[in-house]
Image (spheres, coloured by chain):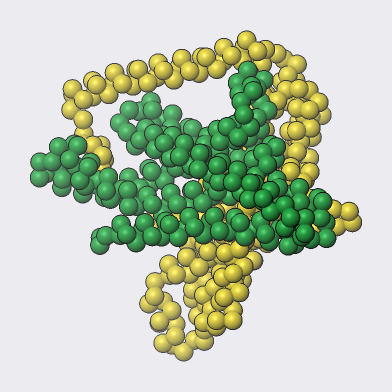
Chain colours: A yellow, B green
Amino acid sequence: MSTVLYDNPGPRTQARHRLYSVIAAGVLLVAAGAVVWRMYETGQFDYALWEPFVTPAYIKVILVDGLWKTLQMAFFSIILAVVFGLVFGVGKLSEHRWVRWPAWVVVEFFRAVPLLLLIVFIFMTYGVGGGIGSFWSVVIGLTLYNGSVLAEVFRAGINAVPKGQSEAAYAIGMSKTQVMRLVLLPQAVKIMLPSIISQMVVALKDTSLGAYVLAPGLTFVAKAIYTEFGNQFQTVIVIAGIYIVVNLLLTWVATWVQKRYVGEKRLDVTHIYGTYESGASMGA
Amino acid sequence: MDDVRSNFDLVLKAFWVTIELLVLSGVASLVLGTLLGAMRVGPIGVLARFATVYVSIVRNTPLLMVFVFIFIAAPELGWFVGTPFLLKGVVALTVYTSAFVCEAVRSGVNSVSVGQAEASRAIGLTFRQSMQLVVLPQAFRAVVPPLASVLIALAKNTSVAAVFGIMEATARMRYFTNNNAEDRTLIFLTFAIGYIIIVEVMSAGAHALERRWRVAR
């Protein structure tokens, strides 16, 4: 296979690559061995430390109070974020300055401010006491942040629709609203679907930030478990594992949607900071 | 707000910590991420697979969990015991951000079309020449926008360090709002503007580089 970096290797290069592979595999194995040995030495394989994760009562806590709450927060915030993104993304494309500028300010503001700062502010201002509580503080923070990112994605998606489409629509006498609603948005949403699903991964990871304001979710449950059992290492492995599995599933769905409904054409969102591809997400 | 105004040096100090985290982990992630990217696109199968696994694990783990691992779990194994907090924060941010730098590098290299390299080999350029003169200059340009996004995300991600007792800007905002409940909004805006300045400076810098290196394709 010839790539942009190198041609098909000949027999001598192949032999050299084999040698390098063996050396690299050796180094990696030694490193992995050292880690496992360290775990053994510090007693990390002790059954008592892993026991909570095979005890039905704790599994239930992890799944119901942890995973389920995390999924709920991510789900609510993405649904709201899609609405927010749609309104402000279209707003940024408006021909009226008094619509375009406020939309631009809102989107830029919430995209540039760290989500954690936003969540802390919302929680301290509206969440505490008789307020909306930590769960909704996190959901609202996630909505504002991911909504602003999606607004940029929506704008990119609408701009990605070939110009001939809107020209043709205007030519047959459609109004601005009709062009947007009947011609541009349906095509834009299709090409954006994978990006929206990927944004769910960002939201899901970011729900973990809620732990800073004592919101429920996997990270919160993790803290409760390792505080009780003193099994910090095991808890991180298990909880991070759950996040990874769920996120890989979501990524797989995004890829499937891309293949099934969108095809080859890909919306490039790597230059938009805050998307999955650009590694925003502190949680992200 | 008087409290913030009379203690404005604390605000500046907090943002200085944020910038320290950003610069140190930015440089470290660029180095480590480029190395991972090289492994990923390189011809050694074992290393390519290692880089792929690293990226897909780290990319799907919340940054907060990476922090928990470095600050709370690793000491159980005897690692990072007694390491300064700032350094531990830099390690956690680097572990996380490197995965995204790796992806940016990979997509940059892949964006150069195979024909370019084939043509340069066809006219007899050596491997080194074709890398130096044809492939890397193009890959480098293509990598600037995604890399800028990754570094801007990193700037905002430094705020997670607040959860682990590092007095950077977000932790400092929480401290001020705790003591001055009635001025919450103004305090929030003060700190938000600080972050916005950092983000906008970085994004302006990236745009300038992009414009400067733009070539007709």
Please state the horizontal and vertical placement of residue A16, each as a whole percent of the image: 24, 21
| Furthest residue toward top | A41
Please state the horizontal and vertical placement of residue A193, each as a whole percent of the image: 53, 58
User: In terms of depth relative to the viewer, which is nearer, A51 or A132?
Assistant: A132
Q: Is residue B19 above or below residue B3?
A: above
Q: Residue shown at 65%/13% (left/top)?
A: A42
Q: Is residue B52 left or right of residue B41?
A: right
Q: Is residue A101 visible?
A: yes
Q: Is residue A193 left or right of residue A136?
A: left
| Furthest residue toward right | A130
Q: Is residue B198 left or right of residue B210?
A: right
- Asked which quadrant contains residue B164, the reply is top right
User: In terms of depth relative to the viewer, which is nearer, B46 or B103?
Assistant: B103
Q: Is residue A182 visible?
A: no
Q: Is residue B128 above or below residue A203?
A: above
| Furthest residue toward bottom | A173
Please state the horizontal and vertical placement of residue B167, each as a whole percent of the image: 68, 42
Q: Residue shown at 78%/23% (left/top)?
A: A229
| Furthest residue toward front | B6
User: In terms of depth relative to the viewer, which is nearer, B169 or A222?
Assistant: B169
Please state the horizontal and vertical placement of residue A236, each as a whole percent of the image: 66, 29
Q: Residue shown at 35%/47% (left/top)?
A: B108
Number of numbered markers: 0
Q: Residue shown at 39%/34% (left/top)?
A: B35
Task: Report the quarter where the N terminus of chain A lies.
Answer: top left
Q: Is residue B43 left or right of residue A134?
A: left
